[in-house]
Amino acid sequence: MSATDRRLVVTADDFGLSREVNEAVEQAHREGILTAASLMVSAPAAADAVARARRMPGLRVGLHLVLVEAWPTLPAAALPDLTDGRGLMRSDMERMGLDLALKSGARRQLAAEIEAQFEAYRATGLPLDHVNAHKHFHIHPLIAGAVLRIGPRYGMRAIRVPREPRAVLRLAEPGFTPRPALDTAPWAALLAVRARQLGLLIPDRTLGLAWSGTMTPERVAGLLTYLPPGLSELYTHPATAGGFPGEAPGYAYAAERDALIAPAAREAVARGGIRSGGFSDFL
């Protein structure tokens, strides 16, 4: 790899969450710079997402593991330590992480749910481009261990490691002072080591952490302008509109869709000689 080689995966998370998300993914792939999407296999609009993905063979699709705040694949009754009274995966990530450490039953339920989501993805027939998790919960060491143990049996060859260099953010938006990710950085570093030991492809950096939900056209164009050499993942949450079940409060979904189809974004990719694709294109 040369010192100027810039490779880029532009990912949309929450594919399958709603029709609005799926519509934006399709539009951003056909008209913009989106190259990949991460599928929530048990979300309400997952079947619609799979149908769209089959019509877009150039879109690289991966598994967006849901281990917090959304719909499990197994019945909630089979996951008593992991689900809440609504039948959704629990939202108290810190307490859930502690329960995983203290309760062997919770760890068994976790492994069963992760396996069920890989099985559901396999059943779609879509090639598996990558794996990540809702709220990046896969960086928890116990969850990471289960994913790294189970995933390779289902063809997992690439995994997101959420590490974002603050220097790039300051170049993209002068005056911005990003908060250090002191709570997640050690776990992300550990995941990187474990993933590399298994021969998995990981990005050199993941862009979108500090501005999650607010990846405006100006910010995306700025990040692309100052994209460092190596393999970068830029992840987003596009939708044609808000107001759907499961949406994150305060997220500017339509603005993130606009950022992916903006002429400035396409021009920055072309001007920078950036090679874009899915993770599987860079293996």
Image: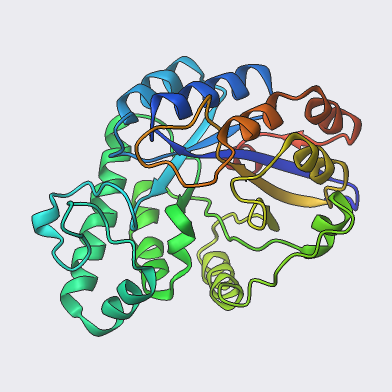
Nearest the eye: 60 or 21: 21
Determine which quarter of the picture holds residue 152: bottom left
- Residue at the spot 62% in from the left edge and 29% down from the top edge: 257
Nearest the eye: 74 or 275: 74
- Residue at the spot 80% in from the left edge and 22% down from the top edge: 263
* 43 on left or right of 24: left
How many tags in the picture?
0
Q: Is residue 97 above or below residue 68?
A: below
Q: Is residue 206 above or below residue 100?
A: above
* 170 on left or right of 93: right
Nearest the eye: 129 or 132: 132
- Residue at the spot 79% in from the left edge and 26% down from the top edge: 266
Determine which quarter of the picture holds residue 30: top right
Q: Quadrant of the C terminus?
A: top right
Q: Position of residue 149 (x, y in %)?
A: 36, 64
Nearest the eye: 63 or 93: 93
**Outermost residue, left direction?**
77
**Outermost residue, bottom direction?**
102
Q: Position of residue 105 (x, y in %)?
A: 15, 74
* 198 on left or right of 43: right
Identify the image's colour scheme: rainbow, by chain, secondary structure or one colour: rainbow
Determine which quarter of the picture holds residue 165: bottom right
Q: Position of residue 177 (x, y in %)?
A: 80, 65
- Residue at the spot 15% in from the left edge and 57% down from the top edge: 85
Q: Position of residue 184 (x, y in %)?
A: 56, 72
